Image (tube, rainbow, N blue to C red):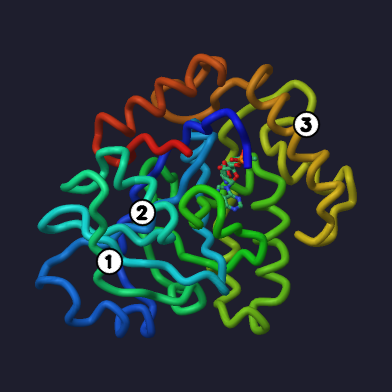
Amino acid sequence: EAVMPQEYTALKLKVLEWAPKAAEAVQGKTPEGSKFFLVPATLRPETMYGQTCCFVGPKITYGVFKVNETDYYIITDRAARNMSYQGVFAKEGVIEKVAEIAGTDIVGTLVNAPLSLHTEGVRILPMETVLSTKGTGVVSCVPSDSPDDYATITDLAKKADYYGIKKEWAELEIFPVIETPAYGNLCAPFLVKKFKIASPKDTKQLEEAKELAYKEGFYQGIMTVGEFKGEKVEVAKPKVREQMLNAGDAFAYSE
Ligand code: A2H
């Protein structure tokens, strides 16, 4: 566990269409017309234009937590407890869990991902390496800039039947978000190929790729999309975050 608090951006991905078993799990547990959100925690808010899916841990159990009269968040119990002390819910320290859903049952759910260039929505997909002890247990997938995410969707597309998903859910177009001098405008695919990373299990090379992608993207990167197109990533990052917070599409979460 890190000593310094980590300041995440928690993004609200609205459920457009539940996977069948998830629909069953929430059926009758909330008032008619309730809105549900998967809530990934990210350290790279400026990359959210590039979301092509969102990951849950297939073996993790998630709670459905009441936020207010209409809204519910799908996150881990641990994250809900932390959020209850950060002004996210109605009463300080009070958590209202209305249902539980197995991660594997959420897979296939269609959500709207704020800022994503895929405005038709993206799917919830499984990622074995999601930790239940970090963030919200939900991870947004940005394969253009995250080597972990790129390695995972490549693997999912290759073994779609094994994972019980539709191949096309893992094959949404990867749009460039950040231009870098060293690795071009799709730095994660570039580094995954350069280091010959064959699967999400190549953790050592992925660690190195992640480090390089982060440094190059953050310190040398220029935004190629969105309202801050042409600006340095360092400058655009807090602006994109602020924009999502102000729009009500995200909130601050720290741990
Ligand atoms: B990042 P740190 Cl484009 N389990 O968001 C595993 N990974 C998790 C997680 C969990 N429970 N919760 C969050 N994360 C991921 C974007 C991104 C991220 C990009 C590039 C790098 C990157 C899109 N995925 O992270 O250990 C989330 O992925 C590189 C570390 O708290 C989150 O930011 O430092 C990051 O890890 C938080 O990791």
**Residue 157: where, in percent of width, then height?**
67, 69
Q: Secondary structure at mark 3?
A: helix
- What's the residue at 67%, 33% (across, down)? 185
Inter-mark Cα distance, 1 to 2: 9 Å
- What's the residue at 86%, 49% (across, down)? 204
Q: Nearer the viewer, residue 117 or 201?
A: 201
Disc on the earlier residue, 1 or 2: 2
Circle 1 residue:
97
Determine whether 25 is above or below 62 in the image: below
Inter-mark Cα distance, 3 to 1: 40 Å
Amino acid on which disc 3 is placed: Leu
Q: Nearer the viewer, residue 239 or 67?
A: 67
**Residue 154: where, in percent of width, then height?**
71, 62
Circle 3 residue:
212
Q: Are marks 1 and 2 in contact (CB under 8 Å)?
A: yes
Quick check: 50 left or right of 153? left
Give the class, few, some or many, for how many residues have Cα within 10 Å of label 1's Cα (few <14, many ≥20).
Answer: some
- What's the residue at 30%, 41% (across, down)? 249
Choose mark 3 or mark 1, whichever is in front.
1
- The answer as to whether callout 1 falls within 8 Å of ligand 1 is no
- Image disc number at residue 80: 2
Disc on the earlier residue, 2 or 3: 2
Disc on the earlier residue, 3 or 1: 1
The quarter of the displayed image where residue 116 is located: top left
Give the class, few, some or many, for how many residues have Cα within 10 Å of label 3's Cα (few <14, many ≥20).
Answer: some
Number of numbered callouts drawn: 3
Amino acid on which disc 1 is placed: Lys
Q: Looking at the figure, which quarter contains the N terminus?
A: top right
